Image (cartoon, coloured by chain):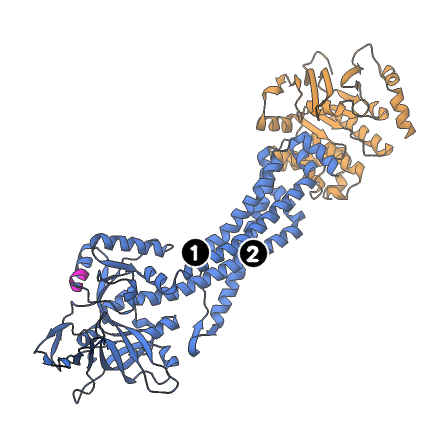
Amino acid sequence: MSKKQKPIIRLDKISKKYGEYKVEIKALDNVSLEIHPGEFVSIIGPSGCGKSTLLHCMGLLDRPTSGTVYIEGKDTSKITGKEISSFRGDKLGFVFQNYNLIPRLTVLENVMLPGLIMNKDPDDLEKRSRLLLKEVGIAHRINHKGIHLSGGEQQKVAIARALINEPVLVLADEPTGALDSENSNEIMDILVKMNEKQHSTFVFVSHDLDVARYGKRTIAIKDGKIISDTSDDSNDFKSMLKTFDKHKKIRRGR
Amino acid sequence: MGVSSRLAFGEFKEHKKIYAIIIVVIALTMTSFMLENAYINYMMQVVDDTTKLTTSDAVIIDPSCNIRDIYGTEVELKNAGKIASEIEERLPGYTTSVRVTSQGSYAFDVENEAVDGCTIQGIDPKKDNALVNIKDKIVKGRFFEEGDPITRGHTPIYIQIEGLGNLPNFAYGTSEKMLEDEKPYPIIIGATVTKVHPSINVGKTFSVTISTSGRKTSFASVNVKVIGLYESGTPTLDTMIWFMHADSLREIKGYGEITGDDWYIPGVGTFRGYKPIEVDENRGDVVIVKAPQAINYLDPIGYSEGVKDTLEKLLPNHNIYTWHDFLVYIAGSMQDVVTIMLWGSIAVTLILCCASIKYVMDSIILRKTREIGSLKAFGARDRVIFKIFLYQGLIIGFIAGLIGIFLSIVVMNFVNWYGLNLEFVAGTQIKIGFIINWLTLLVSMLLPICLAVLAAAAPAKKASTLSPVEALRKGELAL
């Protein structure tokens, strides 16, 4: 991945405020960021620091209060309604902490779903789904209902589902948050493998430093601000760990 | 199949138990609606048929008369024959008949049989049969035939007595046994009369006292012979409506050229006596009119009103009533009341069903918030989410409608085949039957669909407008 390439996504001074009971909470504060094709980015930070909000803004699930999100150079603040839905379905893939499989659908149907929503050819979708499920190592459970799968298996299906529409960017919100360490490592290995094999760009959010370590680039957020980015030469993961040492201890304490 | 319908079917299957309850309630409501409606249709058709025996599509009576006179107390309609001809000439497709009407009373001097009354319709067998199809309703005996002794060539002996003091004038006539070979007038009566009065049947000759004027105390007793029994389906009305030949009644009422002078006996009155009469076919009490076949058979009342309007334009100075006017007069607004009550009870049940659909869907949406958020994240437009829930309403309504129609058709066919009868007045029986028309079928299919879709629309809208991030967050909370 080269920084000379045009970024897939560029956040330009985005801020996000929430107001409740006259109390204003600044979830994101003037965040600027670029993600380039093929990158594998982890975003870390303590709970409530704004990392999920950042991911939601990148995924066009939420609108920033100010600032602009550019995806493949397109100003997304200017697209609305059905265009934003199509844009999201076409360009982005999502992996959620709780997998969010449709329980009554089979593994294959779950993977095909985003493609069907985008009105793609079902036969092509089925072929691609089978391939992706093989890649993530869950091909043997293709006709099982999502509800009958273990957490790790469900997340593998969710990864295949996120890749079905060949998105330019896959966003994963705490992809291992509901898994034990063995399954977490397996899932992260799959994400790395898909990043390398499918040349997909991944951004994932985690509060777990062991998981964040998988990121080839790591961005640390605190109080809605980027405090460290390993793509910056002045930073590396070790110095970042120092920043978050306290949190690491807390996690290990648990 | 689109993604919305696939997901809707999946949702429907997932919640089939709760939806099944709603479907059964709606289906049974629609079954009840169809059965009641089909029975009302049947009853109304039967009553309409009977009513039309007296009125066909419309009846024209003298301006001095009103609707209550259609029981047979109309005064003579001036220029009846001319009016009938004018209608046929100026309104293409319209057919008419000049009728003579009267009221009669009779008794048999049998302990258990009361004095009874009837309205006698004097008909032109050919014309009236074309208008109201009486012949096909004969269940025993026969219709009028050539050679029947429909006239005798004389008026009854007729004496008018001046009322003494406060007593009203009174006229009485009789033609019984005036000649050696005097033959009774042929008459067709309702079959149910034989049940109320077992001493009557086909071939029975008896005396009927007939009013010879719609307004005066003027009667004539004549002998009649039952040649046929008819059934229109409405026993009580059949008991009351009898048919004689129009010329028989013309002779009895003196509608023709009477030769000879009346004799006046001081202190007693006028004695008309036994005088030859040539009946005048153009004289009568009413003109009944049949309009061309209704195009809009779904709205017979509206069609009938249209016929009335047409006739009123042609005959602005006459009283014109439709069969529906008469029906409303004899049955009050029973049909309307029954219909309103039926719709009211159906509406209450359906509103409750709609409320349950909305409630069930609201709770489903609450549970499925995260799923909705995920679908939106995958690019599903609001319309896709909206349709998922709307289609569920559609499926519920469609299945409920189908089951409702199926159940009611099974019940109707069984009852129609089995021939259920209910004991009615004085031993007469009324048949329970059903008539289903396309309008009822259409309503029974479309009503549950429309209501279920309508009930699903609000939750569907709510689900479709959820913001994806809110849906994902709320979903986390809901779990």
Find residue A230 and report its horizontal and vertical position in percent.
80, 15
Rendered image quadrant of residue A44: top right
| Front position in the image: A143 or B226 | B226
Q: Chain of mark 2?
A: B
Q: Please, what is the three-letter code of the amino acid marked with disc 1?
A: Trp
Find residue B413 and report its horizontal and vertical position in percent.
49, 66
Residue range (magenta): B80-84
Q: Describe residue B281's horizontal placement relative to residue B346 as left or right.
A: left
| Residue B416 visible within the image | yes
Circle 2: is it few (<14), some (14-19), or many (20+) Cα within 10 Å?
Answer: many
Q: Describe residue A11's horizontal placement relative to residue B338 as left or right.
A: right
Residue drawn at (26%, 58%) of the image: B320
In the rendered view of the protein, which quadrant contains the N terminus of chain A? top right
Among the chains pictured, the one given orange colouring is A
In the rendered view of the protein, which quadrant contains the C terminus of chain A? top right
| Front position in the image: B232 or B390 | B232
B169 magenta-colored: no
Q: Vertically, is A44 above or below A159?
A: above
Residue drawn at (23%, 81%) of the image: B221
Residue drawn at (15%, 63%) of the image: B79
Rendered image quadrant of residue B304: bottom left
Please name the residue that numbered disc 2 is placed on. B27
Q: Please, what is the three-letter code of the amino acid marked with disc 2?
A: Ala
Among the chains pictured, the one given blue colouring is B
Q: Vertically, is B212 above or below A176?
A: below
Please name the residue that numbered disc 1 is placed on. B438
Q: Residue furthest bottom?
A: B180
Q: Residue furthest front?
A: B165
- Tell me whether marks 2 and 1 sit on the same chain: yes
Q: How many callouts does the rendering have? A: 2
Distance, label 2 to label 1, CA atoms, is 18 Å
Q: Describe residue A83's horizontal placement relative to residue B125 as left or right.
A: right
